Image: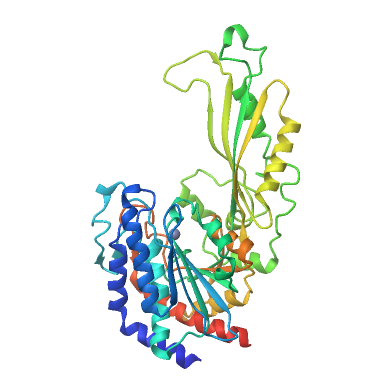
């Protein structure tokens, strides 16, 4: 087995320039999913994915249209009694604005020092090409793959994957797998390979508070009518205690407890208080004192006010007692909280606590569940070993504060956990001008993926 890994890695090292030219072709396609005028380019990018899948050795490649952008599928299922890995990715990219801040044209990729520059280089065309490069390297040295492979590459991740859940539901057996590989996460630093094993979910609300029938003169009516802006602020303020803990009864009931082992692993992340102070520029950190910043971000839920509106906000003054006030509220939720349950608890809390001096309305916009993979899951173990083999250092385990809804969907609909990794770096400027990919890290990433596919085989046989 180590021999085969080594041979495939040697093949990969001898083909860096081929992989780079593949990446160059892919990044040259302006597959911006949000802009209607790029519709043709989206098709072109989907076909490019299909072509790369085919040259990597996958079969039964199909491009499935959706009412948005197409989803590319492919498979290779000849590894008897071996696990099936579903590779997820997205070929769409973020818009390039503000375009005048780009030092090189975003869709004319170029090399500078150790970087490959272009929109999508890191998020995530580079990651997709890395997977194909790994598969191709394996295929060319042994003629087959050690495990079964399925591929699902969508074109709508950057706009919230509106058609992916239905696609997964409609193609359950075609997509059935033992585990999913999602290389859309990144690393903390070039020398710190990282495995993400949990993501927070998200729930959205809008809370409206109504008072008088219309805006009132604050001199004539102030003091006898409860100001809706004040009532809204009072209810919002009541939803946290002085330790930053959410006061809604039952809110934490299904939060999975951090094990000691996990807390120890998370403490290895070089992201202490100073890191967050420096990243945010906030005068001081805030939040539950019993948890470290990385624990709060990865393993604790939040209730956040995203926007507030009421009354007069123009220049100068106006003595108004506003008729209404509104807040946009969202919660980052963690395993094993459910969006609908959070909605129920919040609504119940408002029923109990909003005074009868105002009327109110809560709109629930739905959400996405959190997801978590046991860090000792066989596939997570294989990825840890693969990363360690290449980087010669024990990878960091991380709980991500953000949300990737597809991971929860794959877990719920297909019953498969995801292994999240990726070879992008925090300073790759994803979604920003001058996006780039650090090539030495990317080449190592290809080698780690080669090792991962082989270790998935030995993993099952142990
Ligand atoms: Zn991405």
* Quarter location, residue 365: top right
Q: Nearer the viewer, residue 92 or 314?
A: 92
Which residue in the rendered view is the most extreme toward the top?
220
**Rendered view: 73 above or below 405:** below
Whether residue 133 sits left or right of residue 201 in the image: it is left
Q: Nearer the viewer, residue 114 or 280?
A: 114
Q: Nearer the viewer, residue 410 or 355?
A: 410
Q: Residue at x 31, y 48 (%)?
A: 37
Whether residue 425 sits left or right of residue 149 in the image: it is left
Where residue 54 sits in the image (x, y, percent)? 38, 76
Q: Residue at x 45, y 75 (%)?
A: 60
Whether residue 398 sits left or right of residue 390 in the image: it is right
Where residue 203 sits in the image (x, y, percent)? 60, 46
Is residue 137 in sight in this rendering?
A: yes
Q: How is the image coloured?
A: rainbow
Disc tally is: 0
Q: Residue at x 59, y 64 (%)?
A: 266
Is residue 115 in sight in this rendering?
A: no
* Quarter location, residue 173: bottom right
Where residue 257 sits in the image (x, y, percent)? 71, 60
Whether residue 227 sits left or right of residue 96 in the image: it is right
Q: Nearer the viewer, residue 82 or 21?
A: 82
Question: Ligand 1 shows up in which quadrant of the image?
Answer: bottom left
Question: Which quarter of the rendered picture does the C terminus lie within?
Answer: bottom right
Q: Residue at x 29, y 69 (%)?
A: 114
Where residue 110 sits in the image (x, y, percent)? 24, 65
């Amino acid at each position: 087995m180590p021999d085969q890994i080594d041979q495939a890695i040697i093949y990969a090292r001898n083909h860096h320039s081929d992989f780079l030219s593949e990446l160059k072709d892919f990044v040259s396609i302006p597959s911006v999913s949000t802009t209607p005028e790029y519709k043709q380019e989206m098709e072109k990018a989907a076909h490019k994915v299909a072509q790369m899948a085919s040259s990597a050795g996958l079969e039964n490649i199909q491009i499935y249209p959706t009412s948005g952008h197409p989803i590319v599928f492919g498979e290779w299922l000849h590894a008897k009694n071996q696990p099936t890995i579903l590779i997820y990715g997205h070929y769409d990219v973020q818009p390039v604005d503000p375009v005048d801040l780009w030092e090189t044209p975003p869709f004319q990729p170029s090399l500078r020092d150790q970087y490959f520059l272009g929109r999508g280089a890191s998020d995530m065309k580079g990651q997709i090409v890395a997977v194909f490069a790994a598969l191709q390297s394996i295929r060319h040295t042994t003629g087959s793959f050690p495990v079964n492979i399925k591929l699902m590459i969508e074109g709508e991740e950057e706009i919230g994957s509106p058609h992916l859940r239905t696609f997964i539901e409609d193609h359950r057996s075609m997509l059935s797998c033992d585990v999913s590989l999602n290389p859309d996460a990144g690393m903390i630093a070039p020398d710190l390979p990282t495995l993400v094993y949990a993501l927070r979910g998200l729930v959205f609300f809008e809370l409206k508070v109504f008072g008088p029938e219309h805006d009132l003169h604050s001199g004539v009516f102030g003091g006898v009518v409860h100001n809706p802006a004040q009532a809204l602020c009072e209810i919002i303020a009541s939803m946290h205690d002085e330790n930053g803990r959410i006061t809604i009864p039952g809110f934490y009931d299904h939060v999975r407890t951090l094990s000691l082992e996990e807390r120890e692993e998370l403490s290895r992340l070089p992201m202490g208080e100073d890191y967050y102070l420096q990243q945010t520029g906030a005068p001081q950190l805030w939040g539950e004192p019993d948890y470290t910043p990385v624990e709060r971000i990865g393993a604790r839920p939040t209730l956040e006010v995203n926007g507030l509106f009421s009354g007069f906000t123009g220049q100068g003054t106006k003595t108004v007692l506003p008729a209404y006030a509104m807040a946009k509220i969202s919660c980052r939720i963690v395993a094993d909280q459910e969006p609908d349950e959070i909605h129920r608890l919040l609504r119940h809390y408002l029923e109990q606590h909003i005074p009868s001096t105002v009327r109110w309305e809560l709109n629930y916009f739905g959400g996405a569940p959190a997801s978590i993979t046991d860090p000792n899951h066989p596939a997570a173990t294989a990825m840890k070993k693969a990363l360690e083999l290449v980087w010669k250092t024990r990878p960091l385990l991380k709980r991500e504060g953000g949300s990737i809804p597809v991971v929860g969907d794959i877990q719920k609909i297909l019953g498969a956990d995801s292994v999240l990794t990726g070879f992008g770096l925090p300073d790759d400027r994803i979604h920003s001008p001058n996006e780039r990919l650090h090539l030495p890290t990317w080449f190592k990433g290809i080698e780690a993926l080669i090792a991962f596919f082989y270790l998935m085989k030995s993993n099952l046989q142990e």
